[in-house]
Image (cartoon, helix red, strand yellow):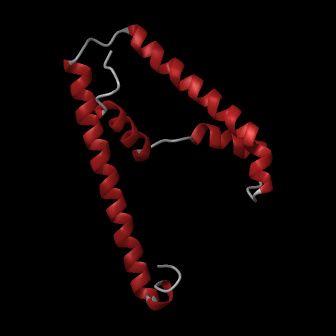
Amino acid sequence: MTNTGKTRISTESEHAVHHVWSYIGFVAETVIFILVGIIMGHRATNDSLIGFSDYMKVFGTYACLHVIRFVSLILFWPFLRYIGYGLNFKQIVLCTYAGLRGAVGLCLALLVAADQDIPNY
């Protein structure tokens, strides 16, 4: 669309189209957050009792994911510079913390939760 369509949309219309798509994205993310809250809340209260060890596993996994993400970014840092992403160390740290958050990560969690091939423990 940006090849041929962008030049055919007037400036006023382009602004309106941007607002419409922004609102559609906001609504989609809100629906995802509501669904994840309902589904995971239901599972947490009905399926089993969540104990202290479960919370420790979550925090341990969270810390390990940050370490793995940081190591991956450090390993690919020269390649990222070569292809044009001139990241400095502060930006690497920011990318490590930012990671995969929000609606995309929650959608991936729902896909894992709904997969019948993955055992429920």
Image vertical order of residue 65 relative to residue 16, above or below? above
Q: Residue at x 32, y 31 (%)?
A: 113
Q: Is residue 102 left or right of residue 66?
A: left
Q: Position of residue 81 (x, y in %)?
A: 79, 53
Q: Quadrant of residue 9?
A: bottom left
Q: Residue at x 60, y 30 (%)?
A: 66
Q: Is residue 94 left or right of residue 30?
A: right
Q: Position of residue 45 (x, y in %)?
A: 22, 20
Q: How many marks?
A: 0
Q: Position of residue 29 (x, y in %)?
A: 34, 51
Residue occupying the far left of the picture: 46
Image vertical order of residue 101 relative to residue 10, above or below? above
Q: Is residue 103 left or right of residue 83?
A: left
Q: Quadrant of residue 93?
A: top right
Q: Nearer the viewer, residue 67 or 83?
A: 83
Q: Is there any visible trace of residue 118 in the rendered image?
A: yes
Q: Residue at x 31, y 46 (%)?
A: 32
Q: Position of residue 16 (x, y in %)?
A: 37, 79
Q: Is there any visible trace of residue 88 in the rendered image?
A: no
Image vertical order of residue 84 relative to residue 5, above or below? above
Q: Nearer the viewer, residue 13 or 111?
A: 111
Q: Which image quarter is the C terminus in?
A: top left
Residue occupying the far front of the picture: 117
Q: Residue at x 80, y 55 (%)?
A: 82
